[in-house]
């Protein structure tokens, strides 16, 4: 299953989601940190693994 990186526009938290949901279920995706649904997919960095520690 493809894994996509998302970024929360509310708190700025980055997280990965496995895109196994159907179209209508995508609306259920939300930030695991602040529960905001204001998230956006980050393109182009799916396979990038960083060791960044904030
Ligand atoms: Zn958030």
Image (cartoon, rainbow, N blue to C red):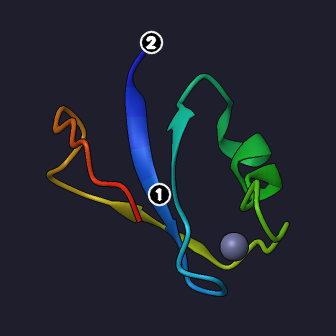
Taking the image as shown, residue 7 lies to the left or right of residue 33, namely left
Residue nearest the observer in this picture, 13 or 45: 13
Q: Residues within 10 Å of mark 2 (few under 14, many from 20)?
A: few
Residue drawn at point x = 78 percent, y = 42 percent: 25
Q: Residues within 10 Å of mark 1 (few under 14, many from 20)?
A: many
Residue with the mark numbered 1: 6
Give x and y (percent) for residue 47: 18, 32
Residue drawn at point x = 14 percent, y = 52 percent: 44
34 lies above or below 25 = below
Q: Which mark is residue 1?
A: 2
Residue drawn at point x = 32 percent, y = 61 percent: 42
Mark 2 close to ligand 1, CB under 8 Å: no
Taking the image as shown, residue 41 lies to the left or right of residue 24, namely left
Quarter, ligand 1: bottom right
Residue drawn at point x = 54 percent, y = 27 percent: 18
51 lies above or below 8 = above
Q: Quadrant of residue 38?
A: bottom right
Give x and y (percent) for residue 22: 68, 31
Helix, strand or loop status at disc 2: loop
Q: Quadrant of residue 51?
A: top left
**Quadrant of the snapshot with the C terminus:** bottom left
Q: Which mark is residue 28?
A: none
**Quadrant of the snapshot with the N terminus:** top left
14 lies above or below 3 = below
Helix, strand or loop status at disc 1: strand
Q: Residue furthest top?
A: 1
Q: How many marks?
A: 2
């Amino acid at each position: 299953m493809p894994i996509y990186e998302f970024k929360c526009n509310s708190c700025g938290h980055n997280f990965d989601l496995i895109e196994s949901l159907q179209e209508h279920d995508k609306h259920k995706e939300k930030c695991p940190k602040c529960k905001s649904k204001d998230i956006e997919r980050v393109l182009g960095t799916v396979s990038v693994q960083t060791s960044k520690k904030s």
